[in-house]
Amino acid sequence: MTWLLYRLFMALGAALLGLVVGEMLRSLTGMEHLGLAFGVLSAALLVLMLDAVRGHRLLNWLRGSQTDSAPRDTGLWGEIGYRIERAVRDRERAVSRGRVELAQFLSAIEASPNGVLMLDAQEQIVWCNRVAADHFSLDPQRDLRQRITNLVRAPAFVAYLQGGNYAEPLVLANGRGQGTLSILVREYGEGMRLVLSLDITERVRNEAMRRDFVANVSHEIRTPLTVLAGFIETLHNLPLTPVERDRVLTLMNQQTQRMQTLVADLLTLAQLEGSPRPAPDRWVSLDGLLARISADAEALSSGRHRLSLRPVTQAELAGVESELLSAIANLVNNAVRYTPEGGDIELAWRVLDGGNGEVTVIDSGPGIAREHIPRLTERFYRVDGSRSRETGGTGLGLSIVKHVMQRHGGELLVESEVGKGSRFRLVFPAARVRLAGDAALGDEAAFNAAALPAH
Ligand code: ADP
């Protein structure tokens, strides 16, 4: 209210000054009431002029960008200017706070592993994160304000978006035709839509693998079961001679063993998948493992092959003994089973530059065509199905080997040429290899010693 007092004082001062001047004029001219009229007029004029000047100054400031401060006038105009400037500054602060929050919000959505795409009521892209751009093959800058249905033309997507029924997600091949997306739409605001996309390629592949696996296991078990059921029926219904009966029982035994091996391999795989990584400091003598494996392989070959299976390694591997035994034994057994009579089978060990250790199984068998090699470690994948089954194979051996090697931080490498033979290599990381005799040394010394060439 100070501005009102100020204004009253100013009008009063102007009126008094006007009265004095008017009184002087009256004494000069002799006209009655001239002083009073002049005083009132002067006061009104002065107030109007001052108002016009200050109002003009404030208006000029408002017309500008308001980056400088409002005119600092006293009285009413000063107060109006100050209040407006404060409101403008408050608004500016709120807007910039809003901008920061929006930027933070958008960068949070940007960091989301899911695709997020905002559409307006005309299906035009308002904003999308990089993941959505990648899923739908869009350009996040160039494609803004474009209708999504002009850019993503898959009929299933267009029908889903325009159908309005978003209760269930849409499953769609992604923009580049590889992989699968799960797309969900949520409506918000006035006709706005949020399109969420999730890459489910891995999930779909895993589900397909699980389905295949169950189908394969069922098939593998059903075959010997059917054979067994047939034999049981034969034993029931037909009068067999003791020789025939013996033959049937031998065949039944083979089928039962086949199922037992299959179940054992399945359990091994399940165990490998479910158990923790092998400890890095449980040392297993490689020579001990190789001696057991060689004895079994010699029995399996029963003199049909030239075997060279007992290298002296003096090495130790860090890991789970049963798993290491199973990995090497699987390779040696395969070599014996697939190499025709008279072939050569060799087992070798060496320490590579850098300290990695390598167990190699080499055979002069039929070899494996190049296109099969990447698939050998798939469960139930067989190159030669009949030979595999004839010799009691389950199709799971190499996938067990691969699992064991992965768990020990190593890898399985396969080189093969049709008609010439195969070379399967198990490469163990240096940290899991040491030479016997280094056991007393510390880990670092053992690591360095492992880098020396094998004797
Ligand atoms: P299986 O129990 O059938 O031997 P594996 O997983 O051990 O299953 O091997 C997968 C397939 O790889 C085999 O069915 C066989 O066709 C091929 N294979 C494995 N080892 C050899 C080898 N040493 N020589 C030729 N083929 C092999």
Image (tube, rainbow, N blue to C red):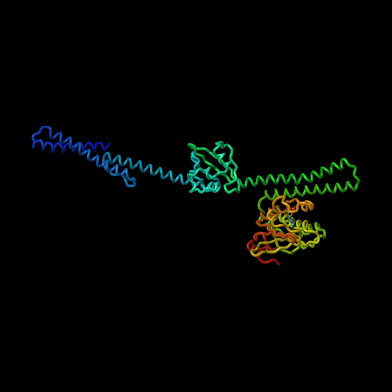
Residue 98 image offset from top left, x and y in percent: 43, 43
Which residue: 22% across, 38% down?
A: 48
Which residue: 50% across, 40% down?
A: 123
Which residue: 58% across, 46% down?
A: 174
Which quadrant of the view contains residue 11?
Answer: top left
The one nearer the camera, 161 or 342, is 161
Which quadrant of the view contains residue 237?
Answer: top right
In the shown orientation, is residue 375 left or right of residue 59?
Answer: right
Which residue: 34% across, 42% down?
A: 86
Residue 241 image offset from top left, x and y in percent: 91, 46
Residue 407 image offset from top left, x and y in percent: 66, 54
In the shown orientation, is residue 213 left or right of residue 49?
Answer: right
Question: Quadrant for ligand 1?
Answer: bottom right
Residue 217 image offset from top left, x and y in percent: 73, 46
Q: Please, is residue 18 above or below residue 321 in the view? A: above
The one nearer the camera, 85 or 206, is 206
The one nearer the camera, 411 or 267, is 411
Q: Quadrant of the C terminus?
A: bottom right
Q: Quadrant of the N terminus?
A: top left
